[in-house]
Image (spheres, coloured by chain):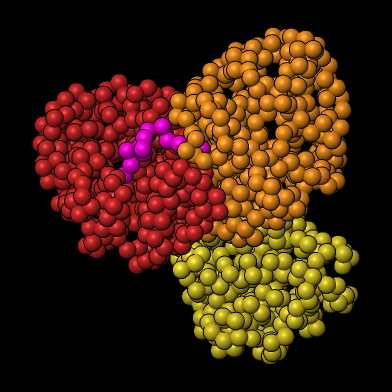
Amino acid sequence: MRVLQKGLIVTQAGDAFREGHVDADGFRIRYMEAGQGPPFVHLHGAGGLRLTRGHDLLSRQFRVIAFEMPGFGASPENDRSRDMPELAATMATATDALGLDQFNLMGTSFGGKTALWLALLQPDRVQALVLEAPAAIRPHGSRPPAGSPEEMARRLFAHPERLAPMPLPDPAVQARQARLTARLRGPDRDADLEGRLPGLVVPTLVLFGTVDRVIPAEMGRFYKELMPNCHLVFVYDAGHAISTDRPEAFVEVVADFIERREAFVISRTDTVIHP
Amino acid sequence: MQVSYFETARYRVPPAIPAEWPVPPGAYDPETGAEAYQGMVDRVQFVEELGFDWVSLSEHHYSPRILTPNIAVSGSYIAARSKRIKIAVLGPIVSQSNPVQVAEEMAMLDTLSNGRLVFGMLRGTTNEYLTFDLNPAEARERTTEGMELILKAWTEPQPFGWQGRHYQFRTVSVWPRPLQQPLPPTYSLGTSRESCEFAARHHIGLGVSFAPFEVVAKSTRYYREQCRHYGWEPAAEQMIYRANILLADTDEEAHELLEQQRRGAAPFPMRAGVREALLKLDQRNVAGEARSPNVGGVLPTSFYGGPDTVVAQIRRCRDEVGVGVLDLAFQNPGAPDTGRLMRSLELFAEKVLPRIREV
Amino acid sequence: MKVSYFETARYRAPRQLPAQWPVPPAAYDRDAGTQSYHGMVERMQFVEKLGFDWISVSEHHYSPQRLTPNPVVSAAYLAGYAQNIKIAVLGPIVSQSNPVQVAEELAMLDNMLPGRLVVGMLRGITGEYLTYGLNPAEARERTSEAMELVLKAWTEPQPFGWQGRHFRFRTVAVWPRPRQQPHPPTYALGTSRESCEFAARHHLGLGVSYAPFGVIAKATRFYRDACAQCGWQPAPEHVIYRANILIGETDAEAEALLDEQRRARQAFPLRAQVRDALLELDIRNVAGEARTPNVGGVLPTNFVGSPDTIVEQIKCCREQSGVGVIDLMFQIPGSADLGFLMRSLELFGTKVLPRIRDV
């Protein structure tokens, strides 16, 4: 995907990523990988796997592994995963198959709920959890983005006018993904999940863009309230797709959190103007 | 000996409020908040009547325990509601403020209060590094540069620019000026060698706090040496000791209350991971000797007992530490209301204050 | 129609002041400074008796005309004396402040003045860019982000971090909270399209100033359209018009005073090269139409005449632009003293105010 920044066209996001596959629970799961350093697993949102400048920046410090979950993209229809915990369990198995013991985990939107369940199921393996505009706690009557590419763009991004036109998604893929996510997204308020969150001690960073038109930023406070080791950060003038809208601002705080966890609240900025 | 009453605009914290700092603002109750400020005014007017020389304020953020994130604002409100008592701001956290803004606000406050301002400049307690993202490694330098800029902004007659390490301004020209000339009584707050040296070099006072007499005495001794080195002698009132006091009718009662307090909650409890990280980064010293910082924990009580005992302790403090001003934080352990606090204040005014004036 | 009295903490220099900005602080006279703050309280108590609805204060730095570099500090002082008048802080220059600090200060004030605080947030006039070294090219963006952060800091119940373009915080958890919920009545100050849109989007009021009624009407029309697009309708009280007023017993008297004022006006012009450079960099608009900024020049007087004439002008203003609050800056012609101001206030309070209540 090409990204316009202040009128300049930069290199294709994801250029440095290499494709791979693992088998888990009878699925052949595709992933894209780049970078060296601590492992950083990413679970995408309802629109499927899409590499952004955020991934590029993260791959400078971490070994980024962005999975394409079964049923998304070109993979065959997934009618076996019955609910989100099952999908999460499958993805946990996928990380096993890659030989990862412990790892940092990020989930975006729909994938945020998947990541939460993965952390609940295997808390000892998740070193830090990052939730990018998570869809696990939603206002009643919440609707996923749908409609024409223009409508989708308006809902996902703070400044759709700044993005280069993206390739039109395959309608068949879109339909399959929509069916899958409808089945797995669960209720707007999931009592079972929320009941377990107070027991999740994994250090967690929750990010919301201040102009998120899919899940309002006000949802962030629920995670902070429920989880014992949770930090809430708003990314100004970013929409639902934070890492597309403001990748540098996004990565700065995510990388710091991965490295220092709750100590990330202590500044190490150098404010010396001249020596 | 002059006596100052340390006022925190204490918010009556119901037990259900989460303890860890920062406390979610959602827990705030507007009625209780308004009461806190009304209580502040009531107590200031009360101690003014009782004959305390100063009321002091401190700057703390994101906490129900001390509702004064901007001292100039509470100081100003108090100035309108009091007549004679001095208003001691001890002090704005210079390392994380705009020093020119501090200079402007304090000049306003000195003028609004008709020259009752006492001004202390603070580096900041360890937990405050998290408020406005101050890098602990830079705190010392930023404080020193900030303090110099504030003094310059008050005394330089011409507009000037400032090419600092941490602060840069093309134009500084502060209006109004402080009412008191050449400066309001000014103090550098902190036991460190850097604080003592700055105070000596700039002919200002020193403020120390909370640690036992032997510890703070090291600082005041070093400060006086440094002053001599710069060719002057500080008066006793140029040294302040802020301390906790637990005054009761009898020694036994005071000891009981002290026990209660020791079992009580720390004022700014922090998540363990953050506290440990801060402990490693925050370097503090007493007149050059390293000491571990207090990261939001309970502070010792330097004066406790019945009136006679406290008078003796104050005399000993004067002998060992040499300060001429005591800034007292009256402890109120366990009690949700301020009734006992008011009685302590009365007891102090009646049975202690008259006996320590000439100390 | 509500009426607000704009109090500037007017400083009356005893001697001729040097002409250019910034005026050296060496020229500051302490007695005049003290007088200006006392006068502030006197005038507030006077207009309160006369029945004015609000008293407003603004932020100006390095200025020998208005001694309020931090308007919240002067407002806190007034709060100590105010009985039932509302205090409007119009407004902190958020583009060059720490927005979290602004949120804290105003929340404190809202608790001291239960239910009677009004807030306006300002981008800042062109000259103010020089105070703390604000890059004019960044002013618009910094203002928008700062205003959002202030609103968030007042309303978000959980501690949060902020990854902005111009501001970054790891932890924000403002205590106290504002007493008024969800926050004090808040206005975006400025005629620009950006101000109007921001106000509409965040359910805030709009504050406009000094321009002729026709120009103001453009902005208020645009604002109301923007609100409609966001699904709500502002009440007349959602729009404030700050204006200069010169009231005389008769029209002739008022006109004569206006002439005198034009001749004797003491502005503080910037050095020509600086002014020209700023004019190039400062881009302003009225509801999207470009307009030249006013760089330290004289502002028009919008209401001039006898009480009858002024009543008509106010009605006309209301018809054209729909404002519901007028925030009046009472002019004092060059040679006149503060007694003139009090007489103007009295004249207005007795002969105009009762007649415009139901406008």
Residue at 51% of width from left, 64% of height from top? A273
Give the side of residue A125 with respect to residue B125, left or right: right
Question: To which quarter of the image does residue C115 belong?
Answer: top right
The segment highlighted magenta reads B175-187
Chain letter for orange, please. C
Q: Is residue B151 left or right of residue C51?
A: left
Which residue lies at the image location 24% right of the left edge and 41% below the top edge? B238
Q: Colour of chain B?
A: red
Q: Chain A: give its colour.
A: yellow
Q: Give the x, y percent position of residue B156.
A: 44, 45
Nearer to us in this view, C122 or B18: C122
C60 part of magenta stretch = no
Percent coordinates x, y for residue C169 in the rendering: 54, 57
Residue depicted at 40% across the width and 27% down the height: B114
**Quarter of the image holding residue C234?**
top right
Residue for point 66% across, 79% down: A56
